[in-house]
Amino acid sequence: MALLACALSAHGADARKKAKAAAAALHAADRACTVDFGRGNLASAQRRCADLEPTASPVATYWRLALSDDPAELRRGLSATALKGIDAEPRLLLLAGRYQFSRGEDRELSDLVRLCAKRKLEGPDIDTLRRLSAGK
């Protein structure tokens, strides 16, 4: 019994190490993509960031949608309904807000602002989203 507990404990520690390493790799790729994107090097950003793993993470979702040119994917991925189901970070919500604002979708923009309020998100990105919703 003690051997089984030890084996399970070692398996849990291994899983935590792998998860930590994956998170660090995702964070490093995010930083590199931000630099590439900021410099206007879109080809490099697309090579590095279009297929980040895990695909369901907010960082991977942000880059997949920010680098997409497919209108159907943008409409589907940047809707308030799609973002309710994931733990969206403020920059992803701001990207969605800017997209909805450019399309003139006031209702979607209001839904995004309500989603931020419900999650109690604060910061400059969320303030910008609120101003977009107010039409300022």
Image (spheres, rainbow, N blue to C red):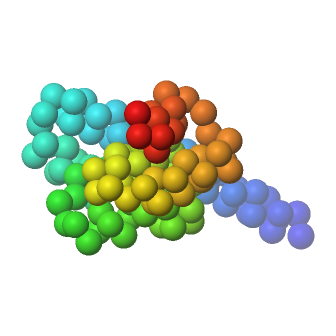
Looking at the image, can residue 67 be seen?
yes
Quadrant housing the C terminus: top left
Q: Residue at x 22, y 48 (%)?
A: 48
Left or right, 94 with respect to 127, comes to: left
Left or right, 73 with respect to 41, comes to: right
Residue 66 lies, in percent from the top left, at 28, 50
Question: Closest to the observer: 106 or 12?
Answer: 106
Q: Residue at x 22, y 66 (%)?
A: 71
Quadrant housing the N terminus: bottom right
Residue 42 lies, in percent from the top left, at 13, 43
Q: With respect to residue 68, does 90 lie above or below?
A: above
Q: With respect to residue 49, does 1 lie above or below?
A: below
| Image quarter of residue 86 | bottom right
Looking at the image, can residue 92 be seen?
no
Looking at this rendering, what residue extends furthest in the front direction?
A: 135
Q: Residue at x 55, y 48 (%)?
A: 113
